[in-house]
Image (tube, coloured by chain):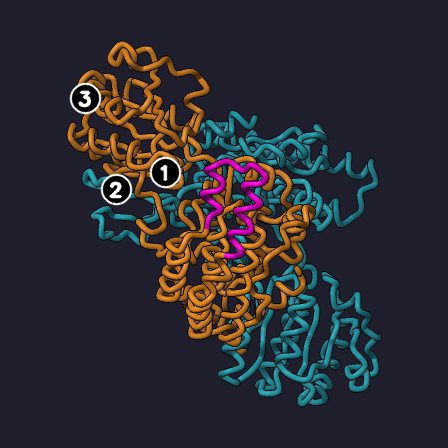
Chain colours: A orange, B cyan
Amino acid sequence: MGRAARAAARLMARADTGSKNAALKAIAAELDKQRPQLAAANEKDMQRGRDNGLDAALLDRLELTDARIDAMIEGLLQIAELPDPVGEVSDLKYRPSGIQVGKMRVPLGVVGIIYESRPNVTIDAASLCLKSGNATILRGGSEALYSNGAIAACIAAGLKQAGLPETAVQVVDTTDRAAVGALIAMPEFVDVIVPRGGKGLIERISREARVPVIKHLDGICHVYLDDRADPQKAFEIALNAKTHRYGVCNAMETLLVAEAVAVEFLSRLAVAYLEQGVELRGCDRTRAIVPQALPATEEDWATEYLAPVLSIRVVADMDAAMDHIAQYSSGHTESIVTEDYTRARRFLAEVDSSSVMVNASTRFADGFEYGLGAEIGISTDKIHARGPVGLEGLTSQKWIVFGDGQIRQ
Amino acid sequence: MGRAARAAARLMARADTGSKNAALKAIAAELDKQRPQLAAANEKDMQRGRDNGLDAALLDRLELTDARIDAMIEGLLQIAELPDPVGEVSDLKYRPSGIQVGKMRVPLGVVGIIYESRPNVTIDAASLCLKSGNATILRGGSEALYSNGAIAACIAAGLKQAGLPETAVQVVDTTDRAAVGALIAMPEFVDVIVPRGGKGLIERISREARVPVIKHLDGICHVYLDDRADPQKAFEIALNAKTHRYGVCNAMETLLVAEAVAVEFLSRLAVAYLEQGVELRGCDRTRAIVPQALPATEEDWATEYLAPVLSIRVVADMDAAMDHIAQYSSGHTESIVTEDYTRARRFLAEVDSSSVMVNASTRFADGFEYGLGAEIGISTDKIHARGPVGLEGLTSQKWIVFGDGQIRQ
């Protein structure tokens, strides 16, 4: 499988944009045509899941409704519309030796995607890898065995119609328990692993992988309300960052408030949070202002709730806020609300997270909102892709040199 | 040490360009002032090396001559002249939501450098990391214990004079054998490891590291002489790529020649190679043209000689050459010599190496020749930095968002 992927990667790297787009559209058409087969395969997985006592949340993720198939089709057509990153040449310039040096964007090669039960990830991941000229090995959760098989058949048919190798997207038989271990340990056949799923999966893969991993661990995001913040912006951003959606990685988990404005800002915010059913946990000074808040423990500062729970800390000033962030943040997204020019500049420069914002909700940290068109995940790594990873994050740049017979003197 | 580096990294990330340049110049001045101390420390290492029976090549690398100290000083001053990559903002644009999104270049954080006996690497690595705003932990070879200690004292003095934390560059006590193992296994304190040294060292670190590694393995570089090559360019490039220097990673190790021009090109080249004392090893068809060539084995195609030895293979055409390269290349540098427009374009697009060239000697694959000003190494990885790694390769890009109170709808 690794060897087939490596061979397919060479063909995919030189596939022209038209063929890749044709494949994406053909896969979309196949999905539409094969709705009955997809429904039947998914029902088998659902039945097995119910028999095995999977919980409701897992069963919901597993389900392939017509609306979800529509979304997969829509996603494929959107990715077909995106510009092709492969072959883009930049920074081409002449050197004193007479050679002309630049960079060319090229696919990474073979991308391994390891994910859990959502079958739609099969299409999301395959389409991004396909458009960026990579070969892909997909390893989904064993709960979605039949659904992924049916989707894989659509992908293979679409690739074939476009004249691209069917091995460009391979789906691992999920009943093979050793497959994940093999996939993450063969740097000769796999160039990068993108795990998508829960923290346990990602930590295990990071620990054991011998192949580079583009990973997304926690999203412990902070909003700092400065004493020079506009009160209305502070209120709206702090509320939106927590309550717009709870189970997402770019939701705020800890609110930091400058002490000079803590009474003013927290009194109003607490009412709004409690109205929406958000459980508040605060430091002592927060609890003096918001008596309904439970005491926050050391563990709270380091927790990604993914739930209607918020920890709140009153801090002396921006430096104290940045110290808290440096200690507890997972490096995903932090936002400052301030009207102070110098503080905004310092926060942007000094906070070391994949997204750093001024006067905007952390909820904007997202490939679609950033204009990437699509994302395969949000990387909290510092090497290679950082933050939302789109097509460009699945490519690399090689150096190219144009000469006229130059030799080193 | 990890904790101190992490703390220093925060201070270094916000150090202004002037302070970093002042530190580089102060370190240069210290090296100049401390020449007697450096010589004495180096003599202790040399004496110990001679006592321990180190071979001449190793002793040569260990020696810190006045010329080498001059070169270190020169390197420091050159790096002070380079533009500071930190804080560079690119691709800033407005999104439909009203937020303005862009990328800011930031240091990686803490860079661990593991190297062998050359003490001058201490300065090279420290100065590149310093200018790019990183904190560094350096672990040199135990043979250079005293020399590295003396150099570290100069670095600490220079950092102090410029008002930067002395812990921004820490040198590990090389008598501590467990230090390498610890350094490569603490992702919480080290963001990236750059090993510099022999293949054994790099393979071991790649295998065991739990921290991302920017590595350079082999340089098995190829030149392909196409049947549409200009004969004079073909002759000069093939000769220069092999004989300009032998012990370097960007020297050609295998020459591929199109069969239509094999007799013409190889007859002339063989004379020139043999005149320079290059041992030739060829495929059967090469040996039919060059009887002095020894038979090349399968192992030859996969060997980085780093010596006056060259393997030669006659191939049917460019596709066969690219197949050979895909199978045997280490992904460092390949060059085609041709006057054919379409073939030049295909070779550039399809060959998957960190540098791909047309009509130029592989010897140009070098940070100085590419205009990076300096390099910490040449990466044969595909993730993050690829090819010569300069200041930019020691940085990462985070996303920045400017808002006016925007929230997600």
Tell me if residue A197 comes above or below residue A406 in the rendering. Answer: above
Compare residues B175 and B302 and report the one nearer the observer.
Answer: B302
Q: What stretch is highlighted in magenta?
A: A40-63
Tell me if residue A185 comes above or below residue B306 in the rendering. Answer: above
Same chain, labels 2 and 3: no
Apparent side of residue B174 relative to residue B95 in the rendered image (left or right): right
Chain assignment, label 1:
A
Whether residue B384 appears in magenta in the rendering, the answer is: no
Tell me the crowding category of disc 1: few under 14, some 14 to 19, or many 20 or more residues within 10 angstroms, Cα based: many
Compare residues B360 and A333 and report the one nearer the observer.
Answer: A333
Counting every numbered tag in the picture gives 3
> Disc 3 designates what residue?
A268
- Determine the image quadrant of residue B222: bottom right
Amino acid at dot 3: Arg
Residue drawn at 55 percent across, 43 percent down: A49
Q: Do residues under tags 2 and 1 come within 8 Å of each other at their CB atoms?
A: no
Apparent side of residue B373 relative to residue A284 in the rendered image (left or right): right
Residue B408: mark: 2
Amino acid at dot 1: Asn
Amino acid at dot 2: Arg
> Disc 1 designates what residue?
A250
Cα separation, mark 2 vs mark 1, equals 11 Å
Q: In which quarter of the image is the C terminus of chain B?
A: top left
- Determine the image quadrant of residue B217: bottom right
Q: Position of residue A238 (x, y in %)?
A: 25, 30
Q: Where is residue B364 in the image (x, y as percent from the top left)?
A: 55, 65
Q: Position of residue A259 (x, y in %)?
A: 25, 17
